Amino acid sequence: MRHDGFETLAIHAGQQADPATGAVVPPIYQVSTYKQDGVGGLRGKELGAAARWIEGYEYSRTDNPTRGALEECLAALEGGARCLAFASGMAAADALIRAVCRPGDHALIPHDAYGGTFRLFDKVLAGSGLSYLPVPMSDAGAVRDALAARPARLVWVETPTNPLLSIADIAALHHLAADAGALLVVDNTFASPYLQQPLALGADAVVHSTTKYIGGHSDVVGGAVVVADPELAERLYFLRNAVGSAPGPFDAWLTLRGAKTLAVRMDRHCANAARIADMLTAHPAVAAVYYPGLASHPGHEVAVKQMRGFGGMVSFRLRAGAAEALAVCGRTRLFTLGESLGGVESLIEHPARMTHASTAGSPLEVPADLIRLSVGIESCDDLIEDLRMALG
């Protein structure tokens, strides 16, 4: 019998009962090395589905059963052929780019990309001969023109973007990238696989910072790449082993535990964020609200088409300017001032000074009066009251 429900997969994919003890939760294989069945005789085939992509175990940098369980689960949730877990979202992004690009290649990135992604392209990979061009990914015509002007090996998409929450039409970009011979990669961190499945819309690979919604509790750092092509997975597997960017077993176990409740958490994140976006839209101190669930959002219709819900991230700008934005960030009590996102607790931050400081002075610089919220799963009435008090 095949079970395809998202919530069922989140709890059962890759998480069969332990064959040795019957434990219903996959064990933490906190181990660096493994006893082998003779020289070159790797162990592990008897451990079942978590080992189905490998010949056996020799060293945990290469493979670990706990990590394998997480990878099988995330591959199922994204509908991919295979998943590779990494020590962080940036490690996942770096490995994927290195797996598909060579010196002299060209990439398109969002004109409002995450600051860490911009830093990776601009300060690290550009030094290795990879050029890039920021393009508004919500404008398919601009992407088409950029691909026509210069061939690209990679089209890197965030949707929704961080922190301006613009929406790209993944299916439309798939056709443009395929016609141009480019690989389409979607950073699905803001949406999570529960709200959006880019591979089903034509993406070649999906990247996650599993630190965020998949882990969901602000207690673990990790990343993942899910791919449609097994051959690309093998290249990623080789790179991860060669570079040593795999997560530890306890990190993998914590992330897997978070994935079990992803669906129910995302429903609450979405419901709370929608109410907060409505409140901010009506508040006289607020100049603009960025949330794809609002009918006024320019990407709303595309978001309705390709997302199950609109997520837990809300950004807004203040009429009083940058100084007041900094002050508001310091006046909340339930919204904790901090970077990151996607945890059960609500966070507030000033992107220009915090998560996106690396974009200062670049075409990707974010407005100084912008505030970004990661809306948690607390009582929404309490969150709204906290924001109202902070806004004065």
Image: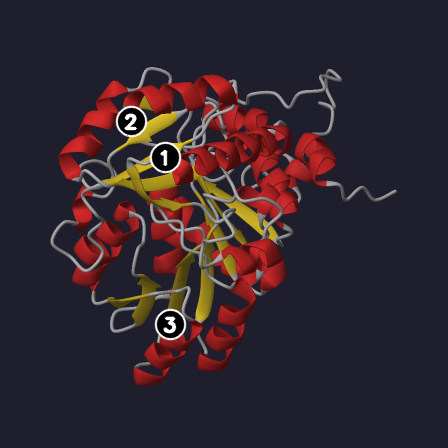
Which residue, given by chain and number where applicable, does mark 3 sit on? 153
Image coordinates of residue 227 in percent, x first then y, are: 54, 56
Quadrant of the rendering where the N terminus is positioned: top right
Q: Amino acid at mark 1?
A: His
Task: Please say if 41 is above or below 19.
Answer: below
Q: Is residue 89 left or right of residue 125?
A: right
Q: Is residue 275 left or right of residue 165?
A: right
Q: Is residue 317 left or right of residue 168?
A: left
Residue 50 in view here: yes
Q: Is residue 15 left or right of residue 146?
A: right
State how many labels appear: 3
Q: Nearer the viewer, residue 290 or 158?
A: 290
Residue drawn 30% across the image and 81% down it: 150
Task: Please say if 377 is above or below 74.
Answer: above
What numbered label is drawn on residue 177? Answer: none
Q: Earlier in the sequence, mark 3 or mark 2?
A: 3
Q: Nearer the viewer, residue 11 or 59?
A: 11
Image coordinates of residue 61 in percent, x first then y, are: 43, 36
Q: For the residue carrying disc 1, how many other residues have a C-alpha within 10 Å: few (<14), some (14-19), or many (20+)?
A: some
Task: Please say if 4 is above or below 324.
Answer: below
What numbered label is drawn on residue 283? Answer: 1
What numbered label is drawn on residue 391? Answer: 2
Residue drawn 21% across the image and 33% down it: 325
Q: Amino acid at mark 3?
A: Arg
What distance separates the C-alpha of mark 3 from that of mark 2? 45 Å
Residue drawn 29% across the image and 72% down it: 105
What distance separates the C-alpha of mark 2 from that of mark 1? 9 Å
Q: Amino acid at mark 2?
A: Leu
Image marks 2 and 1: residues in contact by CB distance under 8 Å: yes
Q: Nearer the viewer, residue 304 or 121?
A: 304
